Image (cartoon, rainbow, N blue to C red):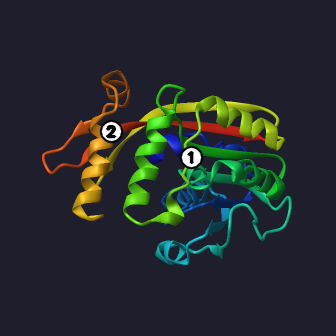
Amino acid sequence: MLPEIIKAVSIPSLPAIATILEAMCGTAKVGIALKEAIEKSGRTCNLSLLDFSQAMLDQADVAAEKVCADACEIPLDSESFDLVLTRFGIHDIEQTKQLLAIREVLRVLKKSSHYVLVTFCTSSETQFYYNKIANLKDELAGNKGEANRFFPTEEECLNLLSDAGFGRIEIKNRFSSKIKLQGTGEMPEEKSKLWADFVSKIPSKIKKKMHIQKQANGNFEYDFPVTVFVAEK
């Protein structure tokens, strides 16, 4: 997956000293790989990492500016980055705030610079089920702070980028990511059964589209479509 993401970044178009932000970075696997690729090209990479979890930032083993903050209120200067990247973070923001987060990305980007958004994308047929599986699991497991995830469709992502104010928007790649959903052991047995029962009752047509498979241990595995967007300020 990392090569597909790095490929979406036009490294030759970056300046000799490139300022890069990975927003909603988690442990910054992509930011670290991108920094290595940029420096391999002979450029200097000044990397900044932003995440709401200090614990995640602490696990990012890289020389970088680390900022623990909400992606909807980025405490960094306007027009200060040559590239911003987000991988699998937008769905962790509730639907009503996703546009705000992308507007913040636009604000911190320099003019004519790019935003690479790598995100899970649902379809109109599967959106309800992808969202319900993740949020019901979080709710039953007691993770109330994570029970407002929203996985947009590809069209909704394009609209978010456009509404935020980005100009040229391209889809650079599409692929799928295999997701393992573990209910057993993460919640009381009776709640685990409720969650598994919901997944089992998803219509067979939708299960086929999502490639849902039940494992021997009672957990589930499925494919989640991923789209790589590149938007220019």
Q: Which residue is mark 1?
A: 150
Question: Which of pointers 1 and 2 indicates the residue nearer the eye?
Answer: 1
For residue 78, which quarter of the picture? Answer: bottom right
Total marks placed? 2
Residue at the extreme left of the image, as rendered: 216
Which residue is located at x 72 percent, y 54 percent? Answer: 101
Tell me the quadrant of the picture where the C terminus can be found: top right
Q: x and y percent of residue 202 in the render?
A: 34, 32
Cα distance in 3D space between marks 1 and 2: 17 Å
Quarter assignment of residue 52: bottom right
Task: Name which residue lies at 82% across and 62% down.
Answer: 80
Task: Of the two numbered discs 1 and 2 on the same chain, state the one appearing first in sequence.
Answer: 1
Q: Nearer the viewer, residue 87 or 223?
A: 223
Q: Position of residue 33 (x, y in %)?
A: 51, 57
Q: Please name the amino acid that badge 1 sits on.
A: Phe
- Checking the image for residue 222, the label placed there is 2
Q: Residue at x 69, y 62 (%)?
A: 71
